[in-house]
Amino acid sequence: MAATLGLVVAEVFGGILGRSVALLNDAVHNLSDVPALGISYLAMRWAERPADTEKTYGYHRAGTLAAYTNAFVLVLLSIWLGYEAFERFRAPVEVVESWMIWTSVAALAVNGGITLALVRGRGDLNLRSILVHNFGDALSNIAIIVGAIIIHVTGAHWIDPLLGLAIGLLVLWSSIGILRESSHILLEGRPRELRVEEVARAILTIEGVQEVHDVHLWSLGGDHHALSLHARVPDMHLDECEQLLASIKQKASQDFGIEHTTVQLERAGLPAHSGYVMPEPVKK
């Protein structure tokens, strides 16, 4: 993270001194890596904090909230730099190609080094996502180097704002994706990999569960998912109810990775008051 932050500072200075909007946009692009790494560390540390009377679900969404805020700032920055690139098309500015080339060479060395260091761990999904991201950063550095050489040979200064606009669109696209995902979690959205009907039908396979309704799935952040539902069961002893509750929680945990399940048991045969009722259990 320190290397990436140093790279951002270098590209900002290089972009200002070299009058290159492409370098400034690439600095913003690399800046998006810093919050991502910091957020991962913050979320990991905060997630270890136990729930308390104020945060009864714990602090799992701290990283999600930070991701939303950072992505929002990056969207504003990418729009502003896109505007600057558009203005450069209208009034071209002579860039200093040497600053573009040497700053991008240094950036390529950092991003290329990180990429090569991560190749050995490409089997891990998280490391693979970082590998792909850094590979994209390295490609943008190569594009700026090639663009600077073309500007030096041809004098076509419009290439710099064109590269800046392309990198800015890349930042905007990735930031909007983060905004969409983080807002989905903050608005209690269903985890993408889970389906309400699949979970409900799985619960119906448990002996004694005759009906399931008011099923709610949401994410606390990361892989921490929660489930609440109403289950209608025949009259039974309290000991049997506790065994049934344990079976429902075990099913949710083992089949869907849901770690927090809340169940309200109701006597079978009561009138339905929910829009999501499954009166017939699946065949066993």
Image (spheres, helix red, strand yellow):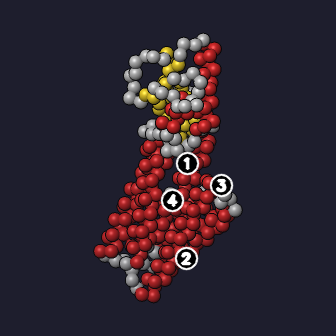
Q: Earlier in the sequence, mark 1 or mark 4?
A: 4
Q: Which residue has dot 2 on it?
A: 102
Q: Amino acid at mark 1?
A: Ile
For discs 1 and 2, the disc positioned in front in the rendered view: 1
What number is the disc on residue 124? 3
Q: Amino acid at mark 3?
A: Asp
Q: Which residue has dot 4 on it?
A: 31
17 or 270: nearer the eye?
270
Q: Which residue has dot 1 on it?
A: 39
For discs 3 and 4, the disc positioned in front in the rendered view: 3
Give SS at disc 1: helix
Give the quarter of the figure containing the C terminus: top right
Q: Earlier in the sequence, mark 3 or mark 1?
A: 1
Give SS at disc 3: loop
Q: Earlier in the sequence, mark 3 or mark 4?
A: 4
Which residue appears at 33% of the width and 69% of the height?
A: 86
Q: Earlier in the sequence, mark 4 or mark 2?
A: 4
Does the residue at mark 1 contact the one at mark 4 (Cβ under 8 Å)?
no
Distance CA(mark 3)–CA(mark 4): 24 Å
Q: Point out residue 62 in the picture as x, y percentages from the top left corner.
A: 52, 41
